[in-house]
Image (cartoon, rainbow, N blue to C red):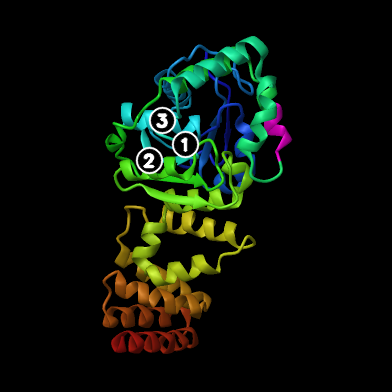
């Protein structure tokens, strides 16, 4: 039997698994979902006994990690990006150490290499088995949130199955990766909430110091559930960490970093979908096809831009043609050929634009 999970985002998007914190459900990621699902095939899952998951037996972090791999296998995901909060991060770190070939990248949010004294987790497991998770509500809101409590997440805690919750407590009691952090080899982001009393920033710094090449981001005004307290800052950190859109590398190689950076800086919520579209479709699918080399694609592109009179784009692609290996003389031949089939006035304007660009390039 599998844990409950949900899928969002484009079917062909890079897979991204999102893991919740103890006591919460897939709803923890709701404020970030729209941004992440623009690009990624997002898989969110519930811990045993949480949300829609049955109280599956899992008493160790390795067993929880195995449940994630079962879900990934069910969806045909050989490898995937992973981000998790608290125990969700611990599951991801365990996957990175025990199954290093399965993760493409890792993000540990308000997490730790060891979550305090093991006996305290056994005490909590005994408490919820005796009195249910509602016994934790009074002490939880101040630990989870720096701002106003999110009642839906507190409702998740109250509804969690005591046995499933207790099993996760026992997994946390036995978890200690402090001596194995150096084994994590995938690109890793560590995110800390500066007001997190459960896993303070010192825990994040220990993770970042122990994992080779890990990046660390501290978010002000965030407690233990940073995605709930500060969703904009968390999603921004994740998007900066996760790989760029398919096609971005080719776009940078052809048009140059300066152009792509300017386009990214000018992107607004209104234009974001269009920028995603051209990066995926033009640069990720057309310019990457093996049937034509980049020199030939530049020749075709220059001709099409002359024919349609797109002179601003023409200037950009004259620079791109130089970067793709065409000489100024070859660019001139393309424009001369265009004069025959696109018209002398169109070619005349194109020659003027190309001359200006070539002169600027000579001077630079």
Q: Quadrant of residue 184?
A: top left
User: Does the segment drawn in magenta span residue 34?
Assistant: no
What is the secondary structure assignment of the residue under circle 1?
Answer: loop
Q: Residues within 10 Å of mark 2 (few under 14, many from 20)?
A: many
Q: Are marks 2 and 3 in contact (CB under 8 Å)?
A: no
Query: Which circle's residue, 2 or 1, is located before the other in the chain?
Result: 1
Secondary structure mostly seen in magenta is helix
Q: Which residues are magenta?
A: 149-155
Q: Quadrant of residue 339?
A: bottom left
Between the residue at mark 1 and the residue at mark 3, the CA separation in whole angstroms equals 9 Å
Q: From the viewer's perspective, is the residue at label 1 or at label 3 nearer?
A: 3
**Residue 313's disc number:** none
Q: Which residue is mark 2?
A: 207
Instruction: Confirm whether residue 245 shows in the render.
Output: no
Q: Quadrant of residue 335?
A: bottom left
Taking 307 as reference, is 74 above or below it?
above
Q: Position of residue 70 (x, y in %)?
A: 45, 20
Between the residue at mark 2 and the residue at mark 3, the CA separation in whole angstroms equals 10 Å
Q: Which residue is mark 1?
A: 111
Residue at image x 56%, y 41%? 9
Between the residue at mark 2 and the residue at mark 1, the CA separation in whole angstroms equals 9 Å
Residue extending farthest to the right is 151
Q: Which residue is mark 3?
A: 114
Instruction: Confirm whether residue 219 shows in the render.
Output: yes
């Amino acid at each position: 039997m599998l844990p409950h999970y949900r899928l969002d985002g484009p079917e062909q998007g890079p897979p991204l698994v999102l893991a919740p914190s103890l006591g919460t459900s897939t709803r923890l990621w709701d404020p970030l979902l729209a941004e992440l699902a623009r690009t990624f095939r997002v898989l969110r899952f519930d811990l045993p006994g949480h949300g829609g998951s049955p109280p599956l037996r899992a008493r160790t972090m390795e067993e929880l990690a195995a449940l994630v791999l079962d879900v990934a296998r069910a969806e045909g995901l050989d490898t995937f990006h992973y981000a998790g909060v608290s125990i969700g991060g611990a599951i991801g770190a365990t996957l990175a150490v025990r199954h290093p070939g399965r993760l493409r990248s890792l993000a540990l949010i308000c997490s730790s290499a060891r979550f305090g004294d093991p006996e305290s987790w056994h005490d909590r497991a005994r408490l919820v088995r005796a009195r249910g998770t509602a016994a934790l509500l009074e002490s939880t809101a101040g630990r989870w949130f720096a701002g106003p409590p999110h009642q839906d997440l507190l409702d998740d805690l109250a509804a969690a199955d005591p046995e499933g919750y207790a099993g996760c407590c026992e997994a946390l009691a036995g978890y200690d990766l402090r001596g194995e952090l150096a084994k994590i080899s995938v690109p890793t982001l560590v995110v800390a909430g500066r007001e997190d009393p459960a896993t303070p920033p010192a825990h994040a710094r220990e993770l970042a110091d122990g994992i080779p090449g890990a990046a660390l981001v501290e978010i002000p005004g965030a407690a233990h559930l940073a995605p709930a307290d500060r969703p904009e800052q968390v999603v921004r950190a994740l998007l900066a960490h996760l790989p760029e859109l398919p096609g971005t590398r080719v776009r940078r190689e052809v048009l140059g970093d300066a152009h792509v950076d300017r386009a990214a800086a000018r992107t607004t919520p209104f234009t974001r979908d269009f920028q995603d579209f051209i990066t995926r479709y033009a640069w990720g699918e057309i310019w990457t096809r093996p049937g034509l080399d980049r020199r030939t694609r530049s020749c075709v592109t220059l001709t099409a831009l002359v024919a349609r009179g797109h002179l601003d784009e023409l200037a950009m692609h004259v620079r791109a043609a130089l970067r793709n290996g065409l000489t100024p003389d070859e660019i001139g031949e393309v424009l001369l050929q265009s004069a025959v089939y696109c018209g002398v006035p169109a070619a005349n304007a194109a020659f003027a634009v190309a001359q200006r660009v070539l002169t600027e390039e000579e001077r630079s």
